[in-house]
Amino acid sequence: MNRRYYKIPLLVIAALTWSISSVSCGKSSGHQEETESHDHDHEGHDHSEENHIHEEGDHDHGDNDHDSADHDGHDHSGLIELKKEQAERFGVVTEKIVPSSFSEVTAVSGRIESKASDEGIATATRNGILTISPSINVGVRVSAGSSIGSISASNVQGGDPMVQAVAVRNAAKRELDRLKPLHDDGIVSTEEFNNALRAYEEAEATVKTSRQGSASVNSPKAGVITQLLAKSGEYVEVGQSIAVISGNTSLTLRADVPEKYIGRLAGVKTANFRPSSSEEVISLEDVNGRLISNAGTSVSENGYIPVYFSFSNNGKVAPGAFAEVFLKSGERHNVLSVPKEAIVEINGNKCVYASHGDGHYVKHVVTLGGSDGRKVEILSGLNPDEEVVVKGAQVVRMAETSATAVPGHTHNH
């Protein structure tokens, strides 16, 4: 009986071992077969569930091998897909980024002003009540000789000064006519006669400037109205300034530099600036700009040192506008920088997109340095000679967030 008790388990174990080994040969390697046989020989209980899990792992491993083969063994994780025709359609432009010179920049506030030599002043041609034309305001462009407003004496308190002026002139004329024959006969002195003549001429001039009806106030030159010095309904006198007109051909950029930056001013030669009315940053070098004063010729005003530049107006700048000014001083070489438009902020990180083959892009998180208003220094996160998206970065950003990334490869490293 004892012999039969030991024989049956041995036969059962042998049969199970042969069966599992046969299945394993079809699905697993020889090494796995040896491991499974070894496990069953020594543990003496069923490991079918473990074998099943191990076999699924083997299957997944085979899929990974297949993916690697399809991608030539390269890691393309994090690629963003945007077809070439779509990129062109939405204005995506790339540019190879190479190290170059980059100026030290001091960002300050400033203002755009007219040059005195390029201004004209419209004045009152008679005494009376001023009426500004409805279309006239600061910033409006006018042509030479065009009407800015009119002056009327009809509603002036105390009556029309024209009546008084005519009466004075007529009296002066009568006195002059009375003295002339007496002067010719030597009865009246020349001095007395000349005084009467002068009084008549002055009275006649007053009549000419006090004509009945309205007198027009005209622009002395073509340009833009930068100031209105009188308002409709005000009483004005002959020669009083009514409006300032800038020819707008040459303007002045004033940069207000805090005193703490005085040490940087010695090296300042040029600047970039962005008018408050625009998003465009303008380089003085592109509009014939030049420095006309520096720290050595300027005096501090309320804690600020004004620095002035002269430049030709490109038609995009209006006198009187405030501006953000980027003063450029000493240059550093071999600096990696990208246009400001290339930078995208994502979850508090500054990022740029680089081309990665036809129709694909990859995102780089970068560390920024200084900015001259147009370009931004890249301290880390980008390599030289990469093809970076310099226009249309937001388009690539939308492609990234709209599930257009390469399937199965959307996770970033």
Image (cartoon, rainbow, N blue to C red):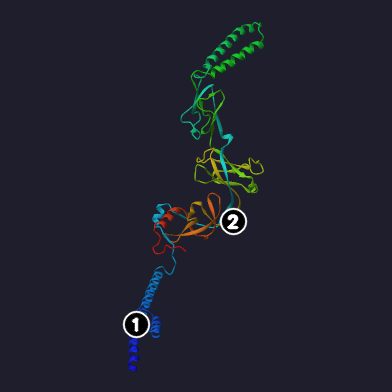
Image position of 135 with respect to 97: above or below: above
- Is 242 in front, or is 288? 242
| Residue 159, placed above or below residue 250 | above
Residue carrying label 2: 333
Query: Depth-wise, is mark 2 or mark 1 nearer the camera?
Result: 1
Q: Secondary structure at mark 1?
A: helix
Q: Residue at the spot x=42%, y=57% of the render?
A: 400
Rendered location of residue 323, percent (x, y): 54, 43
Name the amino acid, label 1.
Answer: Ile
Relative image position of residue 325 (x, y in whole percent): 56, 45
Q: Which residue is mark 1?
A: 20
- Work out whether residue 227 or residue 60 is closer to the camera in this orientation and state it: 60
Q: Which labelled disc corresponds to residue 187?
A: none
The answer to whether residue 388 is above or below residue 226 is: below
Q: Amino acid at mark 2?
A: His
User: Which of the pair 205/4 is nearer the observer?
Assistant: 4
Q: Earlier in the sequence, mark 2 or mark 1?
A: 1
Quadrant placement of the N terminus: bottom left
Closer to us: 75 or 146: 75
Residue 19 as seen in the image, left or right of residue 193? left
Q: Secondary structure at mark 2?
A: strand
Outermost residue toward the front in this view? 1
Q: Position of residue 383 (x, y in %)?
A: 52, 61
Q: CA distance from mark 2 to mark 1?
A: 71 Å
Say whether residue 284 is visible.
no
